[in-house]
Image (cartoon, helix red, strand yellow):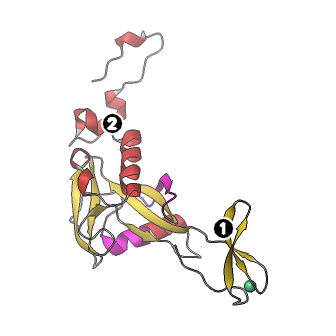
Amino acid sequence: MVDLKFCPYCRGRLVARLLFDKHRLVCTQCGRIVHQNHRVAVSTIAFTTTGHMVLVRRAIEPGYGRWVIPGGYSEVGEKLDKAAMRETLEEVEIKPISDRLVLSGLYSYPSTDLILVVYAIQVERSVLTWGPECLEARWFSFRDIPWSSLVFDSTKDALHDWLAANGSCWQSGLEGRAVDTERQWPRRQAGEHPSTVQPQ
Ligand SMILES: [Zn+2]
């Protein structure tokens, strides 16, 4: 949380006053309430159809040496999905199969002023190179995500949620195979009894 002392509108001194059941910063000069807003971070789950995703190991604090999905802070004047891709590419070179980022989840916690916006994008399983904010970047199978070495609750929650929604194909033994939903769950023919439709 930023420790504000002066009003951003008139530079008057700020004091904390109990207003609407909460201590808020009020300018002693112009009387405005100065709201302390969230910061917005953006991250990307870059996954392949073979059941792998990219994690990076942080070379900066907080969380030095621990794994996280690539990302960083969005900037004013920037679309969030563009910010997610920009920040991701600053950390690790990925090769997206399309330019379509899909919103995966939003994460916020009372202990921090950060909101994390997580996108997912399908990528090629390419050779990884990484930037100075990372010690390394690596492909992880969805089954081998290093849960105990992840940093930030938001990372864990984002990966849990994404895998719960998207990872079942790979968790059921299809890892390493491209997933063809038509072949696994054939379309039912007219008049066909449901019990005759079996996954192949
Ligand atoms: Zn003021």
Disc number for residue 23? 1
Image spot of residue 5 (x, y percent) = 61, 84
Q: Is residue 94 left or right of residue 139?
A: right
Taking the magenta stretch, the answer to whether it contains residue 121 is no
Q: Is residue 109 magenta?
A: yes
Image quarter of residue 43: bottom left
- Magenta range: 85-111
The amino acid type of the residue labelled 1 equals His
Residue visible at 68% across and 87% down? Answer: 13
Q: Which residue is mark 2?
A: 168
Secondary structure at numbered mark 1: strand
Does residue 170 lie above or below 183 as drawn?
below
Give residue 72's position: percent from left, percent from top. 42, 70
Spatial separation of the CA atoms under disc 2 and disc 1: 45 Å
**Measured along the vertical axis of the image, is residue 110 above or below residue 84?**
above
Question: Which label number is shown at residue 79?
Answer: none
Which residue sits furthest bottom? 11
Residue positioned 78% across, 80% down in the render: 31
